[in-house]
Image (cartoon, grey):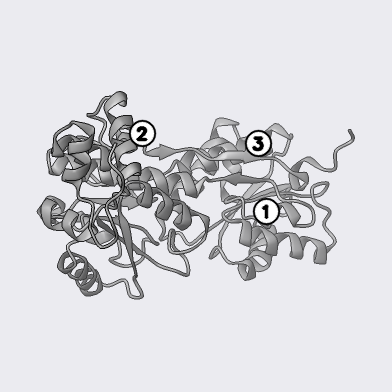
Amino acid sequence: MDRKKTQGQRVTLADVAKMAGVSKQTASRVVNDSAQVTEETRARVLKCIEVLGFRPSALARQLNSGRSYTLGVVANAEIGYLTNGAAYVGMVRQADQLGYALLSKEMREFSRSSVDIMLNHLIERHVDGIIWAGPEIGDSHAWMNDYPIDDLPMPIVVINAHPRAGVDTVGFDNFLAGKNATRHLLSLQRRHIGHISGPMQRWVSQQRWAGWRAALEEAGLAEEQSCYVEGDWEVTSGGPSLRRLLDVCPQLDAVFVGSDRMALGVLHEAHRMGLRVPEDIAVMGIDNDPQSAYFMPPLTTMHQNTVLMAEVALRLLVRRISERRDEPYPAACAEAEATVLTHELIARESTLGKSTA
């Protein structure tokens, strides 16, 4: 095989194709990780790329394909998904593997005019697709109810929100999470199970609340559905919410809390009131906050794999981009994936008590 070109000479895709004995189109498919290439051909082209020191030109790739290889991410940094933490890092890595960069935009207001500004900003920058995340506040998601989504020049995938006809959504089954959390408490012979929800204007909170109610009804305890108060997902609302819940339901022996942050406030208030956890009252949350295993006592919770959610959303978006352009799926996106994900019960001392093992 030929040696790498001398300094100052740029190796082109045509050089790679010539050395590998394939067409330029086939070499391009290998560079773009297309599934429409045999493994033998892929290996030969990759070897030639290594020998020649070929580096794809991002600008040439964009000009030749008429696309930016950039994906827009709209979220809220304070109370939404995907603008920080492990989920965002996972999505960045997945995008990089698929040859895309991310353009993150923070939505600070939730009016229709703010939505329009955000959409126009992303359209002007020719992003190939959009991940729409963040809380369902005001018009931040409601705009999709009457907006002709198909008229957007790029596909859009929504994260963990109320499903809408014609809109791709990736998220968790929060109804099932609420139901399974309550079933866990029922399995421990708790019969007066209260619920502290997140803000009830949020679809996620509504679904978890509905799952709690369904599990009680399934167990023949529909009368306990009055043991409910609303919180705000923050630690400061946990204590006041527990006091209000005890006023409504004095016989309370367990509580399913709508977030681990609120559950920390509940544990603190229970200790202050002299209530033993879990002997007097079992407490469990949802989210599996990284600190929840270090609460006193360690918190039983429902784990939601937000890294997986972010990666599935991104792969789905790239599938939709490929479909719009009538192109084969990249290998990483070749198989369709489930878009409704489930939580995993993480049982700890706040419901089980200390292990006797």
Q: Residue 326 at x, y = what percent?
A: 12, 38
Q: Amino acid at mark 2?
A: Glu
Query: Between disc 2 and disc 1, whose residue precedes?
Result: 1
Distance Cα–Cα, label 2 vs label 1: 43 Å
Distance Cα–Cα, label 1 vs label 3: 20 Å
* Quarter of the figure with the C terminus: top right
* Outermost right residue: 356
Contact check, label 3 and label 2, Cβ < 8 Å: no
Compared with 209, 102 (above or below) is below
Distance Cα–Cα, label 3 vs label 2: 28 Å
Q: Residue at x 85, y 42 (%)?
A: 354
Compared with 243, 256 (above or below) is above
Q: Amino acid at mark 3?
A: His
Contact check, label 1 and label 3, Cβ < 8 Å: no
Q: Mark 1 — residue? A: 249
Q: Quadrant of residue 148?
A: bottom left
On screen, residue 269 versus residue 127, left or right, reads right
- For disc 2, the neighbor class at 10 Å (few under 14, some 14 to 19, many from 20) is few
Q: Mark 3 — residue? A: 184
Q: Quadrant of residue 290?
A: bottom right
Mark closer to the observer (3, 2) = 2
Q: Residue 24 at x, y = what percent?
A: 14, 39
Callout 3: SS: helix
Q: Mark 2 — residue? A: 337
